[in-house]
Image (cartoon, rainbow, N blue to C red):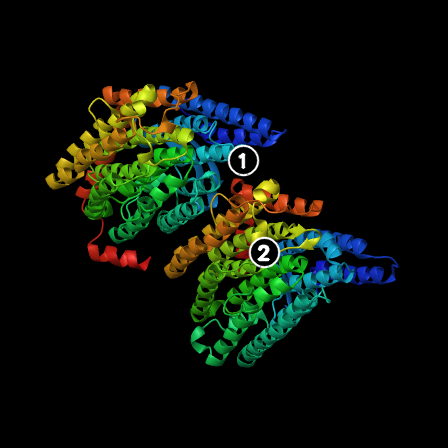
Amino acid sequence: MNWAIALPEIVLAACGLLILVIGVLRRQDATQICTMLTLGAFLVAGGLVLTRSAGVGYFGQFTVDRFAVLAKLLILAGAALSLMLSLDYNRRQGIGRFEYPVLMLYAVVGMMGMVSATSLMTLYVALELHSLALYVMAAFARDDLRSSEAGLKYFVLGALASGLLLYGISLVYGFSGTMDFAALAHALASPAQVSPGLIVGVVFVIAGLAFKISAAPFHMWTPDVYEGSPTAVTVFFATAPKVAAMALFMRVMVGPFGHLLASWQLVIEIVSVASMVLGALAAIGQTNIKRLMAYSSIGHMGYALIGLATGTELGLRGVLVYLIVYLFMSAGTWACIMAMRRKGLAVEEIADLSGLARTDPALALAFGIFMFSLAGIPPLAGFFGKLYVFLAAVQSGLWALAIIGVLTSVVGSYYYLRIVKVMYFDAPGEAFDRRPSMIGFVAAATGLFTLFFFLFPGPLVAAAGSAAAALFG
Amino acid sequence: MNAAGFPVLSLITWLPLVGCGVIMTVRGDEATVASNARWIALWTSLIVFAVSLVLWVEWNPHDPGFQFMESLPWLPDYGVGYKMGVDGISVLFVLLSTLLTPICILASWESITRYVREYMIAFLILETMMVGMFCALDFVVFYIFFEGVLIPMFLIIGVWGGPRRVYSAFKFFLFTLAGSVLMLLALLAMWQYAHTTDIPTLMHTHFPAKMQFWLFLAFFASFAVKVPMWPVHTWLPDAHVEAPTAGSVILAGVLLKMGAYGFLRFSVPMLPQASAQLAPLVFTLSVVAVVYAALVALAQEDMKKLVAYSSIAHMGVVTIGIFTFDVQGIQGALFLMLSHGIISAALFLVVGVIYDRLHTREIARYGGLAARMPFYAFLFMVFVMASVGLPGTSGFVGEFLITIGALHVNFWLALLGSLGLILGPMYTLYLYRRVIFGRLTKPDLRGLLDLKPREIAIFAPLALLAIWMGVYPSSFTRFWEATVTQMVAQHQQAMAAPPLLPPKVQLAEATSR
């Protein structure tokens, strides 16, 4: 048995245990050292991911291919960025405890398992590992009512979604007799013989996964959880789990259910349109920046789903480019949001940003770049994400999706522009506190990536292309 | 390489960004930063203009194709490359952009006092986007520059604009964006059909008739907003009124030309059948624009709004010229675009001069300025005459050629289109009379000073050009004669050629894609 294929996950999990022990045994506050060790563990895991050769292990339950490698690197990058941002934030909010990095580490282990899963069982176990860690993280500010509420809400709705997913999996298993992706793909090769029960199962699986990527109409938890959770946790929610769940979604839809494209395409299209429309319209009325970003993330998942709805290699390449771009620009946006702090208290109203261009030009510039990029204005990175999914949609003849997509992006650009307007056009308010250097570093790094993506799109697009090709064998 | 021996187009496109980089490094107190930013921006834009003169000197008027070509791989897997080049249609607009930018920076020298550094950076970025857009020979690169213009312009209107700047900035941004995302869909469809976004290749690609129809509408949505054509022109008066003077200058001088340039670069050569089929629609909208905008201009109380509506009317004449598919018509359209780029820019600057002194643009607040500001009154007169198309000025040549072109199409079109020549003088001269002539009765006008040397430096090149273009037009038309002749020949060829496939098959093919 080729057990070493899961070495990055095994090493990471072992590091997690070790860090937990260190945290418990040290007498003084261990947050700093545990965070640093976790970052180190992410780095090691990243190195191991890069050096693993492709293959299948654990009796077909676990696969490493170019797709998994790309997704894992993105997950690790997202987690590392949000962990860097969390250290100072958690300390200032009085929730700096060493369990935080450990929980994040196990969530990452779960996500890495998700993107490598080639059996419905591995999929479910890995998904639960990552979800349980996230539920706890949402409620990490345990003395804060909103955070506890967010954790509880996320848990209850998440449990419901897990139930739907599990029910779908059992239906699929019951009607096909196998959980293995390759065997499923083989069994479903002739869609004519597929029973309606199995299709129902697939729809339930889609519902469960759509919940995880917060696509409408399974998005209800997103605004409350984004708003209620400590911002450090929200950063994490907005980056790594989105990539993991989307990658899992792609693998499941084109792998075992690839031959059922005609059956599930319409479902994904509907979910995609609903997310884009909701993301564009519902965000307009928001006054809280965290809530606004929650709706924006719903919209963005809608755009990414356009690529999935095509079910083609080009479409998946588009989704992957979208995820790469989205990961960095949303991490950067959240870094800017974390810098919003007055007299030691975090503020999160959009009005608090007024006149930022005067009081803190560098932060306003970075924020502005992210907003224009999220709106999809060239030459910023966000435009290229959209370009590839729309290209795939046009190539597959999904004109309705492409047209709705571009129109909602115009509507959506309104609320991104509104933030630019508040920062640049309005009279300055009180200045924010001096921001820690880590926030400046993350915002600058992701900002430069977003700004100069257009100079070097080739290698990243090629990496996404070969990852997408790996899914199609 | 190319005729210049060095990548001149990339140099003039990207050099302004180097200036931005230098401005960003300036340190010191606010006054030092502001003054350094002004000087750096001015020198950068002057150097860019000097380099761009290479195009004027090295131009080969006998070559109808693209010159000064450059090409670099960018996204080779997708058939997209970084490709630059100019032909007769685009070359003078590159020069117009590089000429107007230093003028704008000079015009903002004293009137902009807040965020001077950011203002100069925004203008230099804007210059990169404008020049890049006219030079781009790859559709994706073109689109990036075309939309990239929105970001600096949004900020220029919103940060440095007048009282209703927020409303105007949003309206400008959303109108233009809504149009251009539809062009994005057209871009994707062409990309998917031809497997390349290389503009010269796309020009020789034959698109099925039904596909052409939809592509034309998508392009039309984008370019009609940009031109702007009636009824999607409403963003323009708002944007002009609220933008700072230099913002209006660039908006009228260059950004409006982007729409007409788009028609000439994409719609007419790539979609000949659809262009011919839908030309009546364009003519109708243009004639409405000419008459309607002129009548609205007549009723304006705000000088900038009046000039803005006159822009709409003039651009209506330009679109008539483009869709005549006639050598004279298209040449006239190009000439009028160029002339309008200089004259409308100058008229906004003229308004800016007295706005800087009295901080109002209300026509009724002025009167009898000729007594206090004779030199100003003279320059104003030059631009007014050029604007109404007095023979001997730049405006006349364009309008005249377009009228000839329109006559080749239809007598009534020529008649209605040239109504602009009658209505134009009405509102423009009326404006001039109310501001310059009459008795100087208002007390606060008595203290006004005539033009300063800086302002003369701004107006002198524009006035010279307006007269040069009118007196000796062939030093400008020589640039595009070969290109336009070839373009019209290709259009006629495409129209005369029998369809490649019987209509039924073509239809099925178009719908199956």
Chain label for disc 1: B
- Crowding at label 2, few (<14), some or many (≥20) Cα neighbours within 10 Å? some
The residue closer to the viewer here, A450 or B76, is: A450
Residue B93 left/right relative to B404 = right
Residue B115, label in figure: 1
Residue A251 — which label? none
Q: Is residue B471 above or below residue A14?
A: above
Q: Residues within 10 Å of mark 1 (few under 14, many from 20)?
A: some
Q: Residue at x 77, y 62 (%)?
A: A99
Q: Residue at coordinates 47% horizontally, 68% vertically from top-left?
A: A259
Question: Looking at the image, can residue B485 be seen?
Answer: no
Q: Which residue corresponds to the image point at 44% horizontal and 67% vertical from the top-left?
A: A270
Front-most of residues A128 and A93:
A93
Q: Is residue B105 above or below residue A153?
A: above
Q: Which residue type does callout 2 highlight? A: Glu
- Say whether mark 2 and mark 1 are on the same chain: no
